Amino acid sequence: LSLRYLSRVPLSEVFDGLIWPRTAVTPGSVRALSSREFGEDDIVIASYPKSGTTWVSEILSAIVHGEDTDALSSIMLEIRAPWLELDRSILPAGHFLNCPSAKFSKTKNVWITHLPLRHLPASIKLLYMARNPKDQAVSYYHFHKMTRYLGQQNDLAWDDFFSLFCSGALCWGDWFDHVLAYWKFAQANPNAKFIFYEDLKKDLLKGVTELEKFIDTHLTLERRSWVVEHCSFEAMKDNTMANRSLLPNFDDKIGKFMRKGIVGDWKNCFTTTQSEAFDELYKKKFEGSGLHFTF
């Protein structure tokens, strides 16, 4: 099963024990990050794929751009919050359909990554976005169907994907290892913050306020309310500057990058047997960690 998956990912390569899709990420682009220097104004958003990365990136981008609404309405999120490990040297011409030459106003630099913690410098200011693994797995499953650098695996059965997910045999590796490493790092490092997708869904205004505090930025009450409205799932789903619909890597005829954005969608995919088996694995992996998710 894992070999079949590996063969479906275009130009896939196993490096550092993980599967990499070399039409987007290469060993060279990953290695380069270990020695990259980040400044005090750089904020790195880390997450396992399909954990709400795009959402929190737009939130943070809206915060750091202050009153500069023109940047948010005219510049793609891919420019405002670049993907660190993306190897731009292999991208086709015109990959970024909106790449401004003019500078835009911002107080901080926002970056995103899906890399395991071990590939990043320890000195960075880090925000980790986590999502309950059952919903994340379902979202990642559908993502494989529409994403060209993952092979657009339309015939990948959910049962097979579930097995691959539980064994960690997917691009970007084992979800449990990924999340737990960042969780432990955040507990010991005041320059890191660990947040949950479900908490933002429950109270986005509170989440925005906490993110302001973490990056030492203060918005007016009016501006904060604007950010909450601008970053609602409904608004972002229709926002071509944030919803990834202009990027050639994703086939929106098969599915939308921003699909449902809800908590509990896993119940439409997981069988009772799968849910119980996953609960046992979850308990075993996270026992004693103090890490708990809302399902």
Image (cartoon, grey):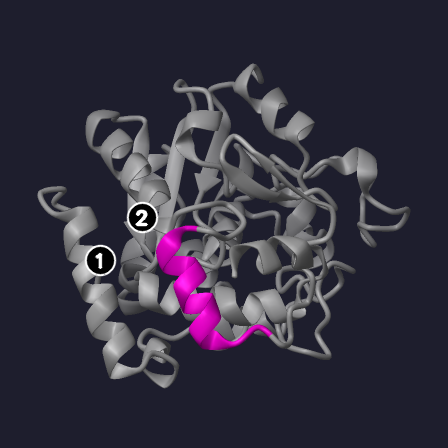
Which residue is outermost to the bottom?
A: 268
**Mark 1 or mark 2, earlier in chain:** 2
| Whether residue 295 can be seen here | no
Which residue is outermost to the right?
A: 93
Q: Name above or below for residue 100 compared with residue 52.
A: above
Kindly identify the residue that appears in the image at 21 percent across and 26 percent down.
Answer: 188
Which label is found at residue 6?
Answer: none
The residue labelled by disc 1 is 281
The residue labelled by disc 2 is 176
Q: Is residue 17 left or right of residue 246?
A: left
Q: Which residues are magenta?
A: 156-168
| 176 or 96: nearer the viewer | 176
Kindly identify the residue that appears in the image at 33 percent across and 73 percent down.
Answer: 263
Where residue 225 appears, as percent x and y from the top left, is 40, 62
Q: CA distance from mark 1 to mark 2?
A: 10 Å
- Would you say residue 167 sits in the magenta stretch? yes
Circle 1: is it few (<14), some (14-19), or many (20+) Cα within 10 Å?
A: some
Q: Is residue 25 left or right of residue 158?
A: right
Determine contact: label 1, label 2, CB under 8 Å: yes
Q: Is residue 59 left or right of residue 65?
A: left
Which residue is outermost to the left?
A: 288
Which three-letter amino acid code belongs to the residue tagged 1? Leu
Kindly identify the residue that appears in the image at 52 percent across and 44 percent down.
Answer: 66
Where residue 265 appears, as percent x and y from the top left, is 37, 79
Q: Name above or below for residue 256 compared with residue 20.
A: below
Where residue 142 appears, as percent x and y from the top left, is 54, 72
Disc 1 secondary structure class: helix
Q: Is residue 233 left or right of residue 257?
A: left
Which three-letter amino acid code belongs to the residue tagged 2? Phe
